Amino acid sequence: MKNRPDTLETLSRDQLIDVLLQQNSRIDSLEKTLENKVAFYEAQLRLLAAQKYGARSERQTNDLQSDLFNEAEVLVDKADEQLKSSETETITYERQKKRGRVAIDPALPRTDIIHDIPEADKTCACGCQKNQIGDERSERLDYVPPQLTVERHIRYKYACPACEEGVQIADRPASLLPKSNAAPGLLAYVVTAKYQDSLPLYRQSKILARHGVTVPSNTLANWMIKVSEAVAPVIDLMAQQIKQVPVILMDETTLQVNKEPDKKASSKSYMWIRRGLSPPDPDHPHGKDMTLFHYSPSRKAQVAVDLLSGYQGALMTDGYDGYNAAIKEHRLQHANCWAHARRKFIEAEKSLPKGKKSPAITAILNEIGKLYGIEKTIKPMLADDKQTERQAKAKPILEKLKTNLNNKLQTVTPKSKLGEAIAYTLKYWEGLITYLENGYIPIDNNGAENGIRPFVIGRKNWLFSDTVKGAEASARLYSIIETAKANGHEPYHYLRLLFTQLPEAKTEQDMINLLPWNVKRDY
């Protein structure tokens, strides 16, 4: 650098001009790069702020700019509509819903508390005795804390009074945990509280202590592991059943396991989920809804390959490429999730400066909204009818949307949020339109995300699993609870029934009868 002035002094006038132009060009390039980086990080900050403090809902409202890609055609259509509306006027009235207190469930047990007037007031001023002519009733919702009771099993013994031999005692009742003093109701309560209501075991131990019963949290943890092992045959049957469904939805989320072989306590493990819905049949008018969790120390593609072994239907996933090996090896029809694609555009919208709108993003979101509107309309239909409706109504929207995305991609910055959203959507386009070809495939993977959400919420409370056995137990018990809920059961009541009857199940058919879709909700 010290020799630079001397070097410049030796240059001619034209050469100096060239150097100056080169430097100016370099400065312009650096300024442009800096502007892009600043814009990128500002967008990131706005998006992070929106994610942390903004509304979580991804629902979009209809927008007047929903067809900005085809402004000319829309203006003509709107003019035609206005012309038609001017010829015939239709007035509609919508009754406003009454606001007020929600009625108390009539199925809840009632306790009548009688309020009577004083005896002296039952005699009229004229001297006659008053007759009761009716009553007025009002209801208040009360709460009785959980009550701990003790089952005392008394087994009678019999013996011959003459020979004093042949002593016989009544059989010991079958128990889910033979060496435990926990009855099915208590086990069902603890499982429901932890895996449905996200109440950690140490808190449950304190709650039980307030009711006068000492049960250490490590005892509760031991119960959970043993219960999960006891229901393993039921999980195995569900795993067999799920391979017969026409489409499986899959997702995965992180899990920390403290005592895992050859891994640091802070490292990530994974909980995988498979969600499958078997269509209705004569014995199951509402179908069979299955949700299976699986713990794995990794997110490797081999996990998906193993979980889908023997399956030959369709697979719905997000954009994680770890499923590709399973799709290829098992020759599965693969569909991608429109909710993930839509989320990219919503993030692009949230990354905009406050008060600023992007007509392009609004138009794209409204086109996707039309696809969801079609799905809402055809939801009650059979799979073949859904496929026909999608081909007729959704396919033209998708074809137009793809053309518009390709055109827009040429005009946006690739590293902008909008550019990333468009690139993501076009990258997975073939998977995003697969649902047109199969009426069983949903438009998105929300079924799997909804199934895994209780685990994610619970993880915020209990933070980690201490051991691999604990993680595997969680996978089994979440599978039972979420499958029971998906088939219309209240978790505690189904678990109590299962824990009571499972020890009596002697054959595979006995256990099949206990699967959630085979159990009547009459408990």
Image (spheres, grey):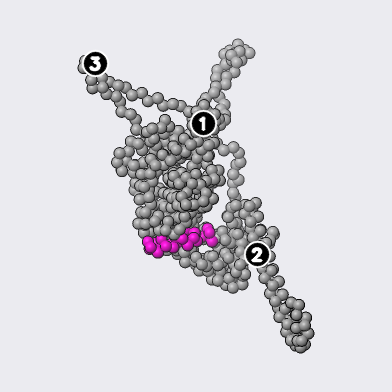
Q: Residue at x 49, y 60 (%)?
A: 320
Please name whichever residue, 54 or 271, is drawn nearer the observer in this view of the structure: 271
Q: Secondary structure at mark 2?
A: helix
Which stretch did the figure color magenta? 317-341
Provide the residue designation for mark 3.
161
Mark-to-mark CA distance, 1 and 2:
53 Å
Mark-to-mark CA distance, 2 and 3:
94 Å
State which tag comes first along the sequence, 1 or 3: 3
Q: In the rendered structure, does residue 185 fall within the stretch colored magenta?
A: no
Q: Residue at x 66, y 58 (%)?
A: 46
Q: Say the numbered circle drawn on residue 40.
A: 2
For this view, does 229 lie left or right of residue 349? left
Mark 2 nearby-residue class (10 Å; few <14, some 14–19, many ≥20): some
What amino acid type should be assigned to the residue bearing mark 3?
Pro
Q: Residue at x 52, y 58 (%)?
A: 339
What amino acid type should be assigned to the residue bearing mark 2?
Phe
